[in-house]
Amino acid sequence: MQEGTVSPPQKHYTQKQLLARQKRRMRRERLRTLPFLMPSFIGVLIFFVLPFLVVIYYSMIDNPITKNFVFLKNFSALLNNAAFKLAVKNTISFSVIAVPLAVILPLLLAIVLMGNIPGRSRFRTMFITPLMVPVASVVLIWQVVFHYNGVLNEITSIFGAEPVDWLKSQYGQIVLLVLFLWKNIGYNMILFMSALAAIPKDILEVATLEGAGPIRRFFSIKLRYLSSSIIFVALLSLINSFKVFREVYLLTGDYPFDSLYLLQHFMNNTFKSLDYQKLSAAAIIMSLVMIVIIGAMLFVDDKFGGDIEE
């Protein structure tokens, strides 16, 4: 600065004024981002919110023609429907068994394959391969293996066992469980391997130096860091347990054996019969149950893994 010039006086703001300026700055930034968010907001409103409101409306009328308001009568009739109760029972029993197995087995495989074992890259490839197999090929393989005259019955007949129509018996859910795990274990295993690799090595080294064994390190350290991944994989597996309907439908059609009649069969058959009020009531009940389950999972994740810094 040259001699003889006077520097401009600097302004001094109070803490209250600084907070007000910061709020105004944030408000301007939000207004600038609003035009970029509007297309997504409009899309969600048109394709998700409004259709769900229409579903709620249909669930509370007697039919789409007369449109008489019946409030919860459709829900009451649905809960007394034998097909709906069978579908709910089968879906719950399948998900209760399939989802924990789809979490525990990939986690164990990830722990094993993270170690220095020979040929681990080949094992990884083997478990990921089912992701690349088309659905039509999967259905064809399962028909060849589990048909009444299929490969499995040919093998068991060698030991004197009677042939079983696996997809039309009480063993149907076991076949479905094997199919579900075969398709999903590889992807879940990769997610767990990625989560295991992200655990800070220095913490594990300190625990080892202090005398903690592999089991103690897993439950005290690794499990805490894996909590978010476990919740995510469980949620993903739950969603995939509903998607398995695609393979079941291709294997067994609209009306399979009772043990394979899932909630998606009921929804699909109800839609074909144009019973919109029953279909809408079932969709709302299913949505409420999923909201409760997802909320419980997120609560558990926040409770046990919220204090872990990523």
Image (tube, helix red, strand yellow):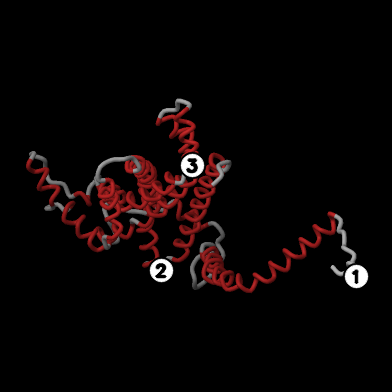
Looking at the rendered image, the disc whose residue lies closer to the viewer, 3 or 1, is 1
Residue of label 3: 200
Question: Residue 291 location in percent, x, y?
Answer: 52, 52
Q: Which residue is denoted by mark 1 in the rendering?
A: 5
Gap between marks 3 and 2 measured at Cα: 55 Å
Residue type at tag 3: Pro
Residue 176 in view of the camera = no
**Answer yes or no: do the residues labelled 1 and 2 have beta carbons within 8 Å?**
no
Q: Which residue is mark 2?
A: 274
Residue occupying the far top of the picture: 211
Figure quadrant of residue 243:
bottom left
Residue at the image position 10 percent from the left and 45 percent from the top: 155
Q: In whole angstroms, how far apart are the C-alphas of marks 1 and 2?
A: 86 Å
Task: Find numbered disc 2 in the image and state the secondary structure of the residue it sits on.
Answer: loop
In-front residue for pair 167/104: 104
Residue at image location 45% in from the left, 27% down from the top = 212
Q: Amino acid at mark 1?
A: Thr
Placement of 225 over or under 37, stated as above or below: above
